[in-house]
Amino acid sequence: MTDSNTPLLPLAGVRVVEFCSTASGPFSTMLLADMGAEVVKIEPPAGDGLRHWPPLNDGYSENFASLNRNKRSAVLNLKDTADAALARQLILGADVVVENNRPGVMDRLGLGWDAMSAEKPQLLYCSISAYGQTGPRSTEGGFDLTIQAASGVMSVTGEPGGAPVKCGVPLVDFASGLYAAFTIAAMLVQVRAGGRGAHIDIPMFGCTLGIAALQTSEYFGTGKSPIKRGSAHPRNAPYQAFQAQDGYFAIAAGNHKLWLSVLDVVGLPKLAEDARFLTPTDRAQHQDALRELLEAVFHRQPVAHWIDAFNAAGVPHARINDYAAALADPQAAHMGWVQPLTLPNGQQTHTFASPVRLNGQGFPIRRPPPALGEHTAEIRAEQAAKQERP
């Protein structure tokens, strides 16, 4: 029976071998590791390229640290016969493999899905790539920027008439990592029930189109591609950022009751009868005119005034926070999301822990992010001991 003070780790005992670099793959395996999976990160002698990304804390990348907690690191040269053999042993002893190389790379190393699943049918083998394992674009590489461009994200990001802009957060990498972790967890249920493993194909291009469901459905329904609207919403208003006396804030009047509450706050009740603003669709179609009317009032007071006013009225609202402000939000403190972290070089920093809670508890950081090859000798010894057993 689990003690009420012991964090629930639903993937405890699941063994994962990661052959990944940068963001999408490492993020997916970190999600699994947060939930208890034992993750061994296989790195080339030069290490995951993310290790060199600034900011560097006495030589150790804070970016790398943010995606590689709760893992062990082993350095293997997969072009070396002995190291490739060890990698093969690790795969056959694992439940899950995650790799984000171009299609065909793992096959050429003798470590691909076909070879490994032939020896271990229960294996879950997850491949993350730019466009998928098959098809006319499968051999192409890709990064977050190029997939944002290809998938349409940049066509709807930014101000109307402005130059192409990517989302400031690398949503392609992280959405793909979420799809990967979710599919792996779902397939583990099938395997544990006696089913076979599977080759999980995670195309970043497809994942990014998948999270754009509102935009693709707008196209299917109208025959027209969605356009840039800045912070505004295509089907609702007021639902965007507005300028006050000393800065910007956002409100989201997502239904008619909230719309009326906005009018109460700004003292413009007659707009409720204006033919341009009767329904959400009407307001969205005339949102430029609506914004001008509302901002004429908002300019009279500072942001703090409007935050307090909309909070009292029950209208969803927010300051336009930078990350310093977001991480210092009292809700983040209450949830315990910002955690202290000791890097392998002994330097102290902080990291954003898993935001998920189970039964009121978050997931612990059981291991700090590893130094390059920190566990190579340990993992070699473990595999050697397994080979010696009768």
Image (cartoon, grey):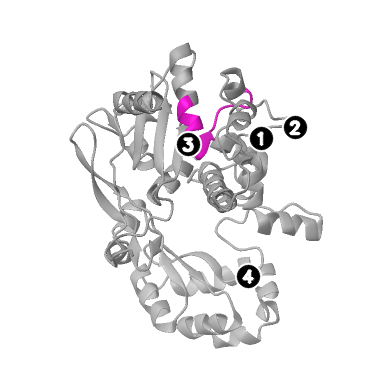
Give amino acid for label 3: Ala
Residue on which disc 3 sits: 94
| Helix, strand or loop for disc 2 | loop
In front: 257, or 238?
A: 257
Residue contact between numbered discs 3 and 4, judged by CB atoms under 8 Å: no
| Helix, strand or loop for disc 1 | loop
Task: Please provide the residue range marked out in magenta.
Answer: 89-104
Residue 277 x, y percent position in the rendering: 66, 78
Q: What residue lies at 20% left-to-right and 31% top-to-bottom?
A: 345
Question: Could you say which disc has been placed on residue 131 in the image?
Answer: 1
Cα separation, mark 1 vs mark 4, equals 33 Å
Question: Could you say which disc has been placed on residue 236 in the image?
Answer: 4
Instruction: Specify which label sits upstream in the sequence, 3 or 2.
Output: 3
Question: Could you say which disc has been placed on residue 254 in the image?
Answer: none
Residue contact between numbered discs 1 and 2, judged by CB atoms under 8 Å: yes
Q: Toward which corner of the image does residue 235 lie, by quadrant?
A: bottom right
Question: Could you say which disc has been placed on residue 135 in the image?
Answer: 2
Numbered disc in front, either 2 or 4 = 2
Q: Residue furthest front?
A: 390
Residue 195 x, y percent position in the rendering: 62, 48
Task: Give the crowd class for mark 1: few <14, some 14-19, many >=20 residues within 10 Å.
Answer: many
Residue 222 x, y percent position in the rendering: 80, 59
Instruction: Specify which label sits upstream in the sequence, 2 or 4.
Output: 2
Q: Toward which corner of the image does residue 378 lie, by quadrant?
A: top left
Give amino acid for label 4: Asn
Cα separation, mark 3 vs mark 2, equals 29 Å
Image-based side of 295 in relation to 218, left or right? left
